[in-house]
């Protein structure tokens, strides 16, 4: 009789790349080059999901070549009309780019860091070639994420980038127990499909988070811009839990927009257990409006950095 073998079952998120530095531990996965977990000791920094579970709601993924929403999946670029697949059917939008559910190829895996690559080949609605390399590294100052995207095709391409970490509220806590600090002076106004239609100052409104503002009862799926940066061009968002610990997410000057989402649509027990804090180089629907959109010429690259730490 031939030998009977049990089929190998990989994790739904593919290969698991574990990295560590001191008390910090993170797992980066093959699918979407996503951060499946990031913690300092027993304290979650990003809310994790189980290895045998499919990622929920773009958890920790790289959002490229656009973050957030593209209305009707349509845009015009250099006189050519384009149509990508709709991935948010209820709102008739294309959501979070093309790479979040693709396998990324390993470039290097070291004890404290991992580098992954995704090459987008021409496809309906995005007839361009884009090579993106992302490196995650744990250091004394926390998790540092460095991304380089290169137009490896023959034509100029539209480009934007975002990330989708969910900041943990802390042990056994809800975001209703947390405060939010974000140095952004304008918020994006949206229609009923969450597509920006304008912007306004947060001064004197319920969307002014430039202090430590309680999140209890707040429902947010909101974009912000006009961020206040430090002398190095770094902007910050800080979520403080009831344990007194703060998760600080930072981004360099390439990221002129932040999206925060309180997770009402997540299933229990995940609902309102974390806050999505999304650094973005462009606003939602940027392929159509141009708000933050970059044009990458053939051979041109752009490098960005962001990260997170527990205070």
Image (tube, rainbow, N blue to C red):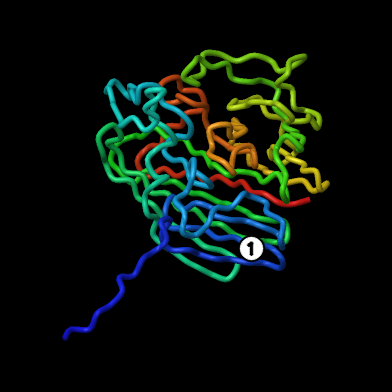
| x, y percent for residue 228 | 72, 30
Q: Front-most of 149 and 55?
A: 55
- In the image, farthest residue toward the left: 1
Residue appearing at x 47%, y 54% in the figure: 53
Residue appearing at x 65%, y 42% in the figure: 273
- Per the image, label 1 sits on a secondary structure element best described as strand
| x, y percent for residue 239 | 73, 40
Apparent side of residue 260 relative to residue 83 in the rendered image (left or right): right
So how many labels did they put on this image?
A: 1
Apparent side of residue 211 relative to residue 48 in the rendered image (left or right): right
Quadrant of res 106? bottom left
User: Which quadrant is home to the N terminus?
Assistant: bottom left
Q: Front-most of 20 and 87?
A: 87
Residue appearing at x 47%, y 28% in the figure: 293
Q: Front-most of 51 and 123?
A: 51
- In the image, farthest residue toward the bottom: 1
Q: Is residue 277 visible?
A: no
| x, y percent for residue 241 | 77, 43
Residue appearing at x 35%, y 22% in the figure: 72
Q: Is residue 272 visible?
A: yes
- In the image, farthest residue toward the right: 244
Quadrant of res 69? top left
Q: Which residue is mark 1?
A: 25
Q: Residues within 10 Å of mark 1 (few under 14, many from 20)?
A: many
| x, y percent for residue 198 | 55, 13
């Amino acid at each position: 009789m031939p030998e009977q073998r049990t089929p190998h079952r990989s994790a739904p998120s593919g290969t698991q790349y574990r990295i560590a530095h001191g008390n910090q531990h993170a797992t980066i996965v093959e699918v979407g080059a996503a951060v499946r977990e990031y913690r300092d000791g027993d304290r979650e920094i990003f809310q994790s999901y189980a290895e045998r579970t499919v990622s929920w709601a773009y958890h920790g993924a790289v959002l490229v070549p656009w973050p957030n929403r593209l209305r009707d999946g349509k845009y015009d670029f250099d006189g050519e009309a384009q149509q990508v697949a709709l991935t948010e059917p209820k709102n008739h939008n294309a959501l979070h780019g093309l790479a979040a559910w693709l396998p990324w190829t390993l470039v290097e895996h070291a004890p404290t860091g991992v580098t992954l690559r995704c090459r987008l080949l021409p496809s309906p609605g995005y007839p361009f070639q884009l090579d993106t390399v992302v490196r995650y590294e744990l250091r004394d100052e926390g998790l540092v994420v460095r991304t380089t995207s290169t137009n490896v095709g023959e034509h100029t391409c539209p480009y934007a980038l975002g990330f989708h970490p969910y900041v943990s509220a802390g042990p056994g806590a809800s975001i209703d127990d947390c405060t939010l600090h974000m140095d952004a002076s304008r918020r994006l106004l949206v229609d009923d499909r969450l597509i920006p239609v304008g912007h306004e100052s947060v001064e004197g409104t319920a969307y002014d988070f430039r202090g430590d503002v309680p999140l209890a009862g707040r429902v947010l799926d909101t974009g912000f811009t006009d961020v206040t940066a430090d002398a190095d061009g770094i902007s910050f968002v800080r979520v403080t839990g009831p344990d007194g610990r703060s998760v600080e997410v930072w981004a360099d000057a390439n990221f002129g927009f932040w999206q925060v989402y309180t997770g009402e649509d997540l299933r229990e027990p995940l609902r309102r257990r974390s806050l999505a804090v999304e650094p973005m180089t462009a606003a939602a629907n940027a392929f159509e409006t141009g708000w933050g959109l970059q044009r990458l010429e053939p051979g041109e690259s752009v490098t960005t950095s962001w990260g997170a730490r527990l205070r």
